[in-house]
Image: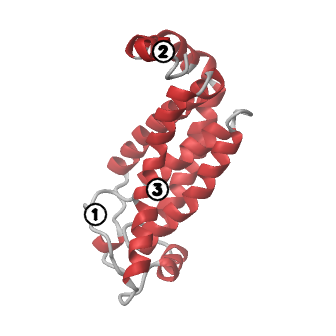
Amino acid sequence: MNALNLTLFERLNAAADTPAWLVMFAHGCAVELMWLLPALLVVGWLRGGEQLKQPLLEALIATLLALAISGIIGMLWPMPRPFAVPVGTTLMAHAPTPAFPSNHLTIILTMAFSLMLHRYTRRIGSLLLLLAIPVGWARIFLGVHFPQDMAGAALLSAVMAVLVGINRAWLVLPVYEHVAKRLYHWLFAPLIRRGWVQR
C-alpha cells in the first residue's frame, strides 16, 4: 500500500470523537444517496421519452458490466478495507469484502459518465458526477474504503462507459428495441393506454 494512499486516507478519515451529526450526514451520503439511481431509472422509464430511455438503458448496461469487472478484480487482487489492515477509524459496519475498486462509486460514476455521452442526458450525468463526490468522501470518512479504491472506480467507470458507448449500435440498441421496449410495453400496457406513463 503506497504512502500517498495512506496519507490521503489519514486526512479524510474521521476522528474517533467525530460528532454524531457529522457521522449521520456521512452515512446518508455513503448509503442513502445511492437510492437516487434506481429512482432515476424507474422514473426515467415511466415518464421519459426515447431520448431518455435509451441512454438510461445504456448506462445500466455499462454499470452492470463495470460491476462484473469489479468483481473479477476483487477476486484476482483482493485489496483489504481499512479496518482489515487495520488503520484509521471505522464508523460504519461493513463486511470485510475486497475494497478495490469501490462498487458504490463504480455504480454512480458509470451511470454519470455514460449519461454524459448523450446530449439529451448530459445535464443529468453532470449532476450524478457531482453526487459522486460526497459518496466517495463519505466512504473514506467512515473508514470502509481507501482513496485508491475511489481512483480505481473512477478509471473503471470511465473506461466502461466509453466502451459501451462506442459499441452501442450492437450492444445497446438491439436490447433496447427487441427486449427492453417490448417488455416495458407488455408490463405497462394498461397504464400506457390511460396515459399515466409514457409510451
Q: Are marks 3 and 1 in contact (CB under 8 Å)?
A: no
Crowding near pointer 3: few (<14 within 10 Å), some, many (20+)? some
Crowding near pointer 2: few (<14 within 10 Å), some, many (20+)? few
Residue type highlighted by circle 2: Arg
In the image, which disc is placed on residue 33?
3
Where, by quadrant of the figure, is residue 16 drawn?
Answer: bottom left
- Left or right: residue 76 compared with residue 107: left
Of residues 174 and 48, the one drawn nearer to the viewer in this rendering: 48
Residue at 30% from the left image edge and 77% from the top image edge? 86
Vertical side of 173 occupied by 152: above or below:
below
Instruction: Tell me if I can see residue 183 in this picture.
Output: no
Q: Position of residue 88 (x, y in %)?
A: 37, 81
Crowding near pointer 1: few (<14 within 10 Å), some, many (20+)? few
Residue type highlighted by circle 3: Leu
Q: Earlier in the sequence, mark 3 or mark 1?
A: 3
Q: Are marks 2 and 1 in contact (CB under 8 Å)?
A: no
Location of mark 2 (residue): 194
Q: Position of residue 60 (x, y in %)?
A: 49, 33
Q: Secondary structure at mark 1?
A: loop
Residue at 69% from the left image edge and 36% from the top image edge? 117
Residue type highlighted by circle 1: His
Residue at the extreme front: 194
Calculate the distance from the C-alpha at mark 3 to the C-alpha at mark 1.
Answer: 17 Å
Calculate the distance from the C-alpha at mark 2 to the C-alpha at mark 3.
Answer: 32 Å
- Location of the N terminus by quadrant is bottom left
